[in-house]
Each structure stands twice: as structure tokens, then as C-alpha cells.
Amino acid sequence: MLAAMSSASPLPSSSQATVAPRDRGDACPGTLRLHAADDGPLARVRVPGGVLTVRQAEALAEAARRLGDGDLHLTSRGNVQLRGLADGCGGALAESLDAAGLLPSAGHERVRNIVASPLSGLDGRGLRDVRPWLTALDTALCASAAAPELSGRFLFALDDGRGDVAGLDADVTVRAAEDGGALLSLGTADEVLSVPAEDAARAALTAAETFLTAARESGARVWRVTELPRRGGLPGLVRDRLTADGIAVGSRTVPGTAPAGAEGPPPGAVGDALSVHVPLGRLTGLQWRELTALAATTAGRELRLTPWRGVVVPVPGLGEERTGKERAGEALARLSVTGLVTDPASPWLRVGACIGRPGCAKSLADVRADATTSLTAAGRAGLPLYWSGCERRCGHPRGERIDVVAVPGGGYDLTRTSTSTSTAHEPRTTHMADPGRLATALAAITS
């Protein structure tokens, strides 16, 4: 149960506080709460750490084929969306996903938002394999009586020390430390807590529960740590709570601990894994079957979905096999034929888009079609491009990029964004009436 916070220890003020009160409840979709999209009901299936067994992958494909549009849509959190669902299919969908182990708790299914370093334990780069943390955190999350109060947007990140998912704006980030312990950070707070590695998952859940208490005491309806009034004192409350629970906690100030614009695994053979990128995050039934069939031939028998709309298939021992390169090349060639990206130089790695028309009623354009037809020009840009059907820019990535936003009256506004405070990198905007003129528009804002 969630322990009460002492009223004698109020949250101190923070110069960084920005209150974003909500005037309605959290409508974030899940498996049991479908969203009414223009192309039919939509379900968002949480996949903690992006990890799917072969059986679970097959169940998702069958649900998409039998109940939806046949495709699987990857999100920027490594989850899966099923679109174009048939009216009244909620019960059948829940039953099939539950049977595959994808619905361990009806009360917690929307809050199982956990991203984890997808190559952890596979390429020798991380400081530790975060899989034990992932398993422990998901189990603890589903057992928490307080956790269902979290928003469907609240995010946990488990980083193996390489700094990839630490740059994804998570509410609670746990990162492997060089001393063998773990570093716990909350939103964008500079104060970082150090805890023993064996207590990392427990500490992450405690941090989330403490956020809920602080949010309730603030009187504001907030969903994310960065929206919490006086959030600068949250690390101190978490530290006190962990200490009371018998966990050894240290504290340090580390400005800018979350790297901006971190990148995911490159396509190709990476250590003991094969990695592919999914153009615009949309996996056809054929592509999914090929990936699942490949995973079924390996000792790991799993797939890992990445927050960068990619898929990693662990192949234990691949990097040590004498025939590893040949085996990897054959498998990647089969995947490439289906349209999956296996070339690290592909321009698709630098292009993203929201769902656009016809799936979203708010979209002003078919952004995916426009992004596809202008791919060649996008590949020559010095920055990644993200196409949005309206000013909400749903799913846009963090870091420096070029936002391509559809505007009323037709065409797009292109804006170069930057995380730099230098005046040399101030946002620059130009209008593009026709996607065929992308190269000219890019030159206007990047020259």
C-alpha cells in the first residue's frame, strides 16, 4: 500500500516548475479501453521492455488479422497498436491477449509503460543486462495497489548504461552505474539517487508511488513528473521513502543526465542479434510472420520491439559462430525482401510520421503518403524529419530535427528545432505548398 507523506515535509518550490492541469480524465487507450479512431476502434497493447515471446507475437498477429486491419503499428514506446478493429470486438481481443500472457492484470494494463535498452545483454556494450530489472519492475507494478492511479502516459525507462532509453523523457529512469549500482532519476530533475542494483526495480516503483502522493497533495491533476508543481522536491521525498524502507540511498547532482536524441540499434547484425527498422512503424502481416519465424528458430525465441520503431531478434551465440556472418546475411536478406530496413544507410531511419489521414480525424493531410513520396529528398537532409498531420505533432521524437507540420489551407510548415541555446540554432520556419518541393524547403531552413 502507498505510505502517507508527512505534511511537515512539503515540496519545496522549483524554478523549473510548470503546471499543466488536466480538465478531464486520462483517455489514453489500452487493451480494455479502446479509442474511437477514424479508421475504427484502436487498441494499444503494452509490451514492457518491448519483449515478446514467439507465442505472444503470433497472438498479436492473429488478433490483427482476425479483428483489425491486419497490420501491427509500433509506437515510440515499443508498444503495439491494433487499428481498424471491428465494432464490439473488445471481449474477443481481451480473451486472446490474456491467453497469450499479454494481459497479466486488468487493473494495470494501461500503466505497464516500460522501455528498456533493446540490445541489453546482446552486444557487450551495456554495463549490465537489465532483463532482471524489467521482470521485477513489471511484476511489482502489477502487484501495486497504487499503480492503477498512474496515467497511461507515465513512463519508466531501464537503461543498461549505454544512454539510449535514458534520453526518452521517462518519468522514472533507472540507469546502470559503473560502480555496479543503479542511478535513479525523476523527469528532468538534476538530483540523481543511487541505489543498490538489487533494489533498482523496487526503487523505481516507490518513486512512481511517491509521485502519486505528491500529485494528490498538490491538488492538481497531473499525469507526468514534469507537470508536477514544485517537483524539485520530489527526489528528496523519494529518498526519504526509500531510506524508510531500508534501502541504502545516495544522492548527487548531475545536470543533463538524459542525453537528447539518443538513437536505437542500427539495422543489421549487432552482436548476438539481428536488427531491422520498420518504415513509419507499420508492420504488415507478412513482415511480422517473417520476424516471428526467425525468432522461432533461435534459442531465445523472442522479439524485442524498440522505441525507435524497430525490431531486434536475439540470436544467442551469433557473434561467436564461425558462420555467423553468413547466417546473419541470409536472414537479413529475407527480411529486406519484405520491405523491412536492414541497411544502416537507409533514409527511412531519418523519417517518421504520425498516423495522419485517414486514421486520424484531426489530421489535415495523408502525411505517410507524402513522407514516402519525398523520401529521396529527406535522405539528403542533415537532420531527421518528422511529419505531423496537425500542430499536436503526436509521437514526435526528442532532440534536434525538422518538424514538417500540415497546416490549414494545405501544405506544410517546416521548422528546424534544436536543443541548443545558441542563437545560431534558433528555430527557422518556411512554408511548403507541395511535398514535391521538399528539397527546396529543406535548403531554405538548413543552409
Image: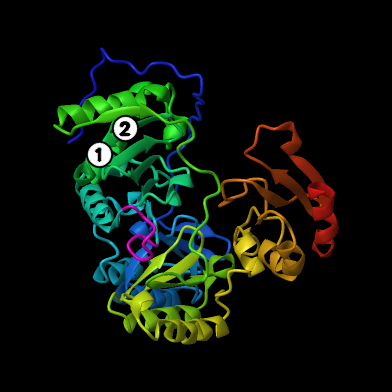
Disc 1 vs disc 2: which is toward the camera?
A: 2
Relative side of 227 to 53, left or right: right
The residue shown at (42%, 60%) is 79
Viewer-nearest residue: 233 or 153:
233
Could you tell me residue 337's position as x and y percent? 56, 85
Residue at mark 2: 193
Q: Residue furthest top?
A: 8
Residue range (magenta): 119-127
Q: Is residue 214 visible?
A: no
Which secondary structure type mostly characterizes the magenta part of the structure?
loop
Q: Residues within 10 Å of mark 2 (few under 14, many from 20)?
A: many
Kindly state the secondary structure of the residue where label 2 is placed.
Answer: strand
Please tell me whether residue 26 is drawn above or below residue 98 in the rendered image: above
Q: Which residue is mark 1?
A: 203
Disc 1 and disc 2 in contact, CB within 8 angstroms: yes
Name the foreground residue: 187 vs 424. Answer: 424
Q: Is residue 400 left or right of residue 442?
A: left
User: Is residue 121 found inside the magenta-colored segment of the image?
Assistant: yes
Q: Amino acid at mark 1?
A: Ala
Tell me if I can see residue 272 in this picture.
Answer: yes
Q: Is residue 319 left or right of residue 265?
A: left
Q: Is residue 137 above or below residue 37?
A: above
